[in-house]
Structures are given as C-alpha cells and as structure tokens.
Amino acid sequence: MPAPVFRSAAANAGGTSIVVAQPAGLVTGDLLIVGVYATGGSAAISASNAGQTWTAVATATKARVWRAIYNGTWTGTLTVTGTTAVSSICSAYATGTFNAASPIDGAATEVTPVASPSMSIGTVTTVRGNCRLVSFVGGDKIPGGLVVINYPTGFSGRSGTGNFPESCALSADLLQPAPGASAASNVTQPLSAVTIAAVLLAVRPSLPPAVVIAGPMGGLDGNVAMIIGIDHLFAVAGPMGGLDGSIGFAVARQSFTKPRREYIWIRNYQGVVLDVLS
C-alpha cells in the first residue's frame, strides 16, 4: 500500500482575520488539511468555507486543524478568524493515495503551548503501515521582532509563513512505514520567550484493491478451499467448496481495522456468510 502523496501547500498570516491560501494544482478528491495558529487562543473557519465541508481534527488551545475532501470547486474564500493574530497552512494530499472514507489514522496529538526554545511535537500511534505523519506548528510573535520556527527534526518541510511579525505557522510531514508509535521529534526556535504549539496527525493510506476470485472453489473430492491474504478485501464470485457442499474458507488479516488479528469468514457453497470468527 503506497503512502499518501503530498500535492502542495500554501500559507498565509496576518491580523485577526485572514484568507487561507488555496494550494496549487488541486484535483477532485484531494485531502485538504488546514492548520491555524491563533495567538489569542481561539480560531474559527468562516461560514463561506470555500465551498468545502470541514471536519475538526484538533481543537487545541492556539493550534487547530480541520480536514475536508476537495469537491472540485474552490468557491469564494476560506477565512479564519481569531481574537488576535492568526496564521494558517493549507496542505493537500493526492486523491487515490489515502483512505477517503477514513483519512485520519488514530487520534491526533495536541501539544499544550509552551514558551521554550525546544518543544516535542508529540507522538501518534498508527494502526496501519505507510501512514504519512503531518505536523502543524505555530508560534506567537516577538514584541518588536520576528518569529522564526524550524521544521520538526526528521520531517520534510512543506510550507510556512516564514518570518512574520504577528504570528507564524508551518507544516511538515514524514513517512511512517510500520504501524505503531511514531518516533519523538522536536521543533525549535531561538528564543525562550516565544510560545509555540503543535498538532501531529497521521494520514491513512488507501485500501489495497480487492482480491476477486471467480469460479468454484474446492476440489471434486470435497477438499476445503482457502483464501489467505494480508490487508486485502475479498470478493468471491461463484460457489465455494466441493461438489458435495463442503465449506470454503476466506481468511484475511485486515490490519486496517484491527492490526494483527485474523478474521475468518465461513461461507456456504453459495458464498453466503455463515459465521465470522476472530
């Protein structure tokens, strides 16, 4: 299962209300992830919402994240507002490379804002392999100066607002090949007086194609037929088992649902499910 593929990202920052920049080259079905950092501790997406349906992923103090599946038309603008300065990143991941029905793997991690030159971005525990970890980080302004925040260690920087006097934000991602807890990573900035916050989430890869088996299963002597696979959905066409009505089995370890567990579908010769064992 290939990992989710990054398409593009765009950033913007300013006062209490800003227009979220649209990523370049969007294709219908792309996954949109919007991260917003609000120095005042609250932010909201406007009712205009660029014609997309947004779902909250993280609502941490100062750092907030929403997601949407791009419907093919960016209508009007997407505006975010806060009580003070806000900054935003909108990242897109290519359609067909992530699980559109359930794009976020596990729960997002929200890191409490701290004033420190170094902060952990937290960890997430993924259920499936080949997830794409996405980190969103934001920071307050320095009175009379500029904000400079570095990308998390080990991550690929995707977009950022750069040195901006009100607030700043950045987005980065990293492939996690195997399921489980992600490795620790820190984000740094040069001054201890600046407050920074982070959200870490995992984008789930697309499901593998279904394994389709057509025709009868089992031998003439009634031997049991079995299908064994890992991370696959099975579609069986035709009778299962031998001519004497013996039962055929389909066995699959479906780690996208519950890792490292086997589910056995017992079907009769017509393919009707008789029982499910786990």
Image (spheres, grey):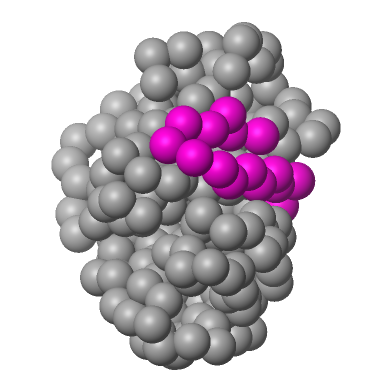
Q: Residue furthest front?
A: 144
Q: Residue at x 29, y 70 (%)?
A: 113
Name the quarter where the N terminus is drawn.
bottom right
Near-viewer residue (106 or 40): 40
State the image coordinates of residue 111 (x, y, percent, origin top left). Answer: 30, 70
At horizontal 74% and vertical 27% (from top left) the residue drawn is 27
Residue 238: % across, % down? 51, 26
| Magenta region, residue range | 6-21
Is 69 included in the stretch rendered in magenta? no
Residue at the right extreme, as displayed: 25
Residue 12 drawn in magenta: yes
Q: Reply above or below: 19 against 128.
A: above
Where is residue 66, by image quadrant? top left
Relative side of 40 to 52, left or right: left
Residue 225 seen by the camera: no
Residue 67: horizontal and vertical position, in percent?
45, 37
